[in-house]
Image (cartoon, helix red, strand yellow):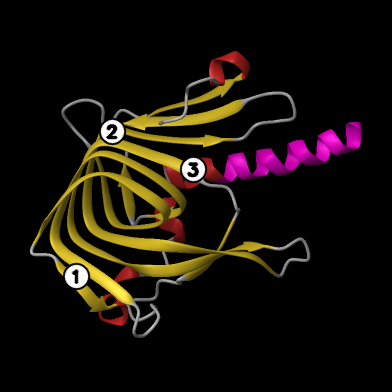
């Protein structure tokens, strides 16, 4: 029983620790090269989703198309495949940004929360790439083009698949479930990171 607890605990805390890196400082270190179109649409992920919320997102250079991510199998090879929507934003401002991820241990709720951009200065990201399961909010697009071939937006996308882009996007009351995020730079103004454990974890997810 103890061995099972230790194994489950180590696995969940490895995933938990991995989420902290891109969310705080080092997201740009794993950027695949948006300027050269070298973004992999077939990415290996942990298999755990996380939530991102914001009061408002203002983004320039918006692109969206389909892709997949894969979990790494127990044998080190490709595991479960997840179809996702990939969104690229050249420059983004996020007001009242929230990110949360559950990392429960057996019998112990654990939620990591990260907040930033809660004052007059928003969190800012350059060359933002988001692989998401779902997105909710109220969106306004400027000069949107719907139904483009995805490879015109990114050469790594599947030829003939659906794509859309716009010069600018505004999304209010943003609620997003993601599997993977990178950015060339991510400036988190007023960063607050907290590990919420036990009773403190209840209701601490972004939504």
Q: Residue 161, position in %: x, y?
A: 35, 79
> Where does the N terminus fall, quadrant-wise?
top right
Look at 60% across and 53% down and name the residue there: 47
Q: Is residue 5 part of the magenta span, yes or no?
A: yes
Q: Is residue 20 part of the magenta span, yes or no?
A: no
The residue tagged 1 is 146
Marks 1 and 3, the one that precedes in the sequence: 3
Q: Is 93 on the left-hand or right-hand side of 65?
A: left
Q: Is 144 on the left-hand or right-hand side of 197?
A: left
Secondary structure found at label 1: strand
Q: Residue 29, position in %: x, y?
A: 44, 57
Marks 2 and 1, the one that precedes in the sequence: 1
Marks 2 and 3, the one that precedes in the sequence: 3
Secondary structure found at label 3: strand
Q: Residue 130, position in %: x, y?
A: 38, 56
Look at 72% across and 44% down and name the residue there: 11
Marker disc for residue 186:
none
**Closest to the observer, 161 or 169:** 161
What is the crowding at mark 3: few (fewer than 14 residues within 10 Å), some, or many (at least 20)?
Answer: some
Look at discs 1 and 3 and give the one toward the viewer: 1
Secondary structure found at label 2: loop
Please state the extent of the stretch shown in magenta in the rendering: 1-18
What is the crowding at mark 2: few (fewer than 14 residues within 10 Å), some, or many (at least 20)?
Answer: some
The residue tagged 3 is 50
The residue tagged 2 is 189
**Residue reaching furthest top?**
199
């Amino acid at each position: 029983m103890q061995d099972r607890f230790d194994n489950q605990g180590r696995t969940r805390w490895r995933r938990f620790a991995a989420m902290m890196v891109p969310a705080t400082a080092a997201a740009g270190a794993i950027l695949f090269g948006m300027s050269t179109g070298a973004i992999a649409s077939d990415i290996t992920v942990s298999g755990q989703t996380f939530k991102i919320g914001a009061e408002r997102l203002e983004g320039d250079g918006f692109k969206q198309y389909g892709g997949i991510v894969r979990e790494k199998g127990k044998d080190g090879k490709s595991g479960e495949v997840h179809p996702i929507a990939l969104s690229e934003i050249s420059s983004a401002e996020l007001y009242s940004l929230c990110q949360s991820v559950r990392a429960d241990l057996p019998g112990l709720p654990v939620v990591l929360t990260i907040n930033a951009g809660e004052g007059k200065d928003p969190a800012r990201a350059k060359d933002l790439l988001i692989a998401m399961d779902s997105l909710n909010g109220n969106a306004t697009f400027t000069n949107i083009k719907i139904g483009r071939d995805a490879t015109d937006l990114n050469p790594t996308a599947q030829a003939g698949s659906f794509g859309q882009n716009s010069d600018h996007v505004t999304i209010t009351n943003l609620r997003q479930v993601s599997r993977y995020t990178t950015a060339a730079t991510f400036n988190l103004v007023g960063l607050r990171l907290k590990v919420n454990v036990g009773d403190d974890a209840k209701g601490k997810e972004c939504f």
